[in-house]
Image (tube, grey):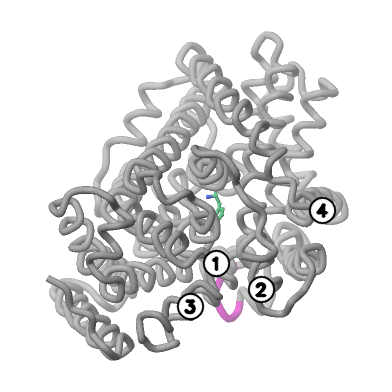
Amino acid sequence: MSGHNVWTHKGTFLLAAVGSAVGLGNLWRFPYLSGENGGGAFILVYALTIFAVGIPILIAEIMLGRTSRQSPIMGMRHLTKTHGTSRAWETIGWLGAASAFLILSFYSVIAGWAIHYTWLMLTGSLVGADAQTISTGFDALLAAPGLMTLYHTLFIAASALIVGMGIHKGIESGLRIMMPALFVILLVVLAYGVVNGDIGAAASFLFTFNIADLSLEGWLQAMGQSFFTLSLGMGAIMAYGAYMPSEISLTRTAFAVAIVDTAVAMVAGLAIFALVFGAGLETGQGPGLMFVTLPLAFAEMPFGALVGGVFFILVLGAAISSSISLIEPVAAFLVERFDMTRPQAVTIMVIAAWAMGLLTVVSFNMWAEGTIFHSLFGRSAFEFIELLTNIFMPVGGLLIALFAGWALTQSEVMKELGSSVTWFKFWRFLVRFVAPAAVAFVFLRTIPQVDGYLIPTLGALLIIGAFAASQRWLKKPRQTT
Ligand code: PHE
């Protein structure tokens, strides 16, 4: 347990997990991806994966952290030893570190945009501005790689300082105020949208669906988003779980995190789309969506500069409490494995992620087209990194589900879950079969050539394959019940 910083109080885990989960994923990514994917159908897949796959895996991930009480990579190493399973399961830790690194690289760049808007709000630069002015302003930001790099550097350095100095505890009390404040201010924006926007159009866009509208990659994005928003499948939650006191209910905590997280995303989505439809803006405008619509509302509403300034500060708070959870697992691993000091570990991780982030910076300007990423993958570097995380996180989650479902013994799990046998059986059914099958299904669904009956057939084969592989990897199958 050396090198880890500790979330001290009871209930702190919940706060930390909510801090990790609620962030740009809810405010920026969820609305922009829903908008690009036509709304309802995307949200349906997203919501189904949150509840049928996300929550059971959330429980599994906290459980692995709490039973091993180490950083994800070392924790998995420990668990494979004590359970006599193949070391291949350490992939969970490695894959998680890779995802964390990739996510941090672009997360910090986007959070940098929020720094820019905090500044614009507080200086009153946008008061009374119209949609045209605001969107031109956003394009100007995108066209300025130097400025974006400056913001990116500021954000990642601030996150690094917090993790490097181990001042989580200071953040704790901040979060207790900032999270509710963020929610309240979102409700204010929503109320503004109800009065001045078109909430009816927003609701029908978000909640009526025709599943055929969802593109093949839309399926992957919806599933990826449900992992992303819950901070799942990459070790963040496992790392925090390592500090969760044993007596706290896993199940209740997991549900609370998922519900709060979903509520924030829904309110943000409704507010943003009410404004989008009210002002006749485009739903599918991509990553700029939040940064163009919300400032427009703040430009018009009374005391908008102040409300908007506070709003973007809270967005930054939510983003920082997420980014520290991206740094934590990798840093903790470097400390445990290579005997580094905490500041050294954080510095290495953050410098690497910072450099990688430059790829995202240039994806919006110098490298917006015609790069090797476009010729190989038909998309910018930023979009390619997002695609990778949309794949890595569900794969990580799948492995977590299989390990928790098949390798842990009933008595271990019962001790962790601390609840009825019925719930245990239901949960185990979800992580053993439902979550793996759902993840496999979505992956197959995205392969364009695969359609019709091929999907269920291949899906079944893949599940059997995963099952066989996990039995092999488990070496000594520990069948209980
Ligand atoms: N869940 C965070 C968000 O929604 C992002 C994140 C992903 C944080 C993975 C940690 C790990 O903004």
List the residue tagged with mark 3. Answer: 78
Label 1 is placed on what type of residue? Gln
User: Residue at horizontal 74%, vertical 17%?
Assistant: 306
Secondary element at tag 1: loop
Which of marks 2 and 4 precedes in the sequence? 4
Of 291 and 46, the residue lying toward us: 46
Give yes or no for contact between labels 4 and 3 (Cβ–Cβ under 8 Å): no
List the residue tagged with mark 1. Answer: 70
Which of marks 2 and 3 precedes in the sequence? 3
Which image quadrant: the N terminus?
A: bottom right
Nearest-to-viewer mark from 4 and 3: 3
Give yes or no for contact between labels 1 and 3 (Cβ–Cβ under 8 Å): yes
Q: Cα distance, mark 1 to mark 4?
A: 25 Å
User: Residue at horizontal 73%, vertical 54%?
Assistant: 163
Which of marks 4 and 1 precedes in the sequence? 1
Q: Cα distance, mark 3 to mark 2?
A: 12 Å
Give yes or no for contact between labels 2 and 1 (Cβ–Cβ under 8 Å): yes
Which of marks 3 and 4 precedes in the sequence? 3
Label 3 is placed on what type of residue? His
Which portion, as a residue range, is magenta?
A: 375-379
Q: Is residue 445 left or right of residue 329?
A: left
